[in-house]
Amino acid sequence: MNTFSQFFAGTGFVAMSWGNTLMIVIGMVFITLAIVKDYEPLLLVPIGFGILVGNIPPVAGMALSVYDDGSVLQYIYFGVSQGVFPPLIFLGIGAMTDFSAMLSNPKLILLGAAAQVGIFLTLMGALALGFTSQEAGAIGIIGGADGPTAIFLSSKLAPHLLGSIAIAAYSYMALVPVIQPPIMMLLTSKEERLIHMKPPRHVSRRERVIFPIAAFLICALIAPGSMVLIGMLFFGNLLKESLVTDRLANTARNAMIDIVTILLGLSVGASTSADHFLTPQSILIFALGAISFCIATAGGILFAKFMNLFLKDKINPLVGAAGVSAVPDSARVVHTVAQKEDPTNFLLMHAMAPNVAGVIGSAISAGVLWTVLVK
């Protein structure tokens, strides 16, 4: 009986708190949304299962969690806490991305820039609520709807908020099909949603090869703090567009990004133990993240409407919603909303232009914030 008592005292059932139970339920909700609703399953399944892993109560004397020195999970989490995984994700994204839609209609880049307004307005809101400037900068980047960028910047400015910011950023990325359509319908008229745009022009191979080199030099010189993310993004794109490094490009956009996504998602989820995650700060971060994402979506749409005051060939304002960095989900949402109004209106390629511009914009914004706010 003594042995049985010792065994039972060492099980997770004894130390299980209401907070652990709540977080396990949240993890199950993430997994359900991924499987049943198909909301970003490549992200929500690893993160959801990681939440389950991170909320099994620890056993005294055993290094198990991401916060225990020498544990396996801590070594995996090193890639998150030190900002190693996000640049590798960007390398894979670059190897997947076709910048032709953006290059064929450069004025749509402005929509990707306009959507970054959510980052800076949320930063000011976080400052007003009492967060430090470093914490506010890390929270504001959630508005870019770019999980790797949010992780990278928070690991540099506010590592103690990393888990909350990462979960918030990926949650809103997954909920793009839920959050964006109501804002799009509210801010546009039926006539605006019916606008057809001219087909994109053909972009030559020379343009596609020169672009990542020239764009990297310009962006890195403007915001040196973005060099790692931007550099990996454009390096991956050069591997793709050069057509002489297909093996490297295929590895970057397939095996490597899949491996990193698994490790990043699982370890980020495992960092959400109830005692670290269920705090008033976390609730504020989620609220500010939602506001930031909504402002970013609205900013892109309203700026497209503003541009139409001066353009002969009008932009469908729906395209502005794709200025956030959730590639390619926000572009697909734009296309879907337009198709409901007019099945002959194809906006996917047009929406990809501000979408990929938003990836660049959020990385540059992160670089600027890191430069300005670093201690």
Image (cartoon, helix red, strand yellow):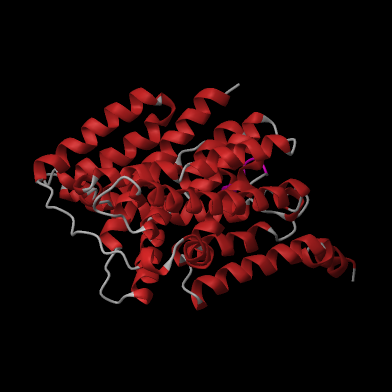
Q: Is residue 13 above or below residue 259?
A: below
Image point (81%, 65%), residue name: 7
Examine the image and state in which quarter residue 3 appears.
bottom right
* Residue 219 shown left or right of residue 49 in the figure: left
In which quadrant is the C terminus drawn? top right
Q: Is residue 324 visible?
A: no
- Specify whether residue 194 is in view: yes
Residue 369: x %, y % from top left: 52, 30
Task: Give coordinates of residue 261: x percent, y percent.
Answer: 44, 54
Question: Where residue 131 sits: x, y (%)?
Answer: 71, 35
Q: Residue at x 26, y 33 (%)?
A: 215
What residue is drawn where x is 37% and y is 71%?
336
Pick whichever, 354 or 87, lies toward us. 354
Whether residue 199 sits left or right of residue 42 in the image: it is left
So how many labels did they put on this image? 0
Given residues 134 and 78, the one toward you in this image is 134
Span colored in magenta: 68-73
Q: Residue drawn 68% across and 34% down? A: 127
Asked if residue 359 lies left or right of residue 311, the reply is right
- Whether residue 231 sits left or right of residue 144 in the image: it is left
186 part of magenta stretch? no
- Say above or below: 157 vs 59: above
Pick the front one: 265 or 115? 115
Give percent across and percent down for residue 173: 49, 57
Compared to residue 13, the image places residue 270 above or below, namely above
SS majority, magenta: loop
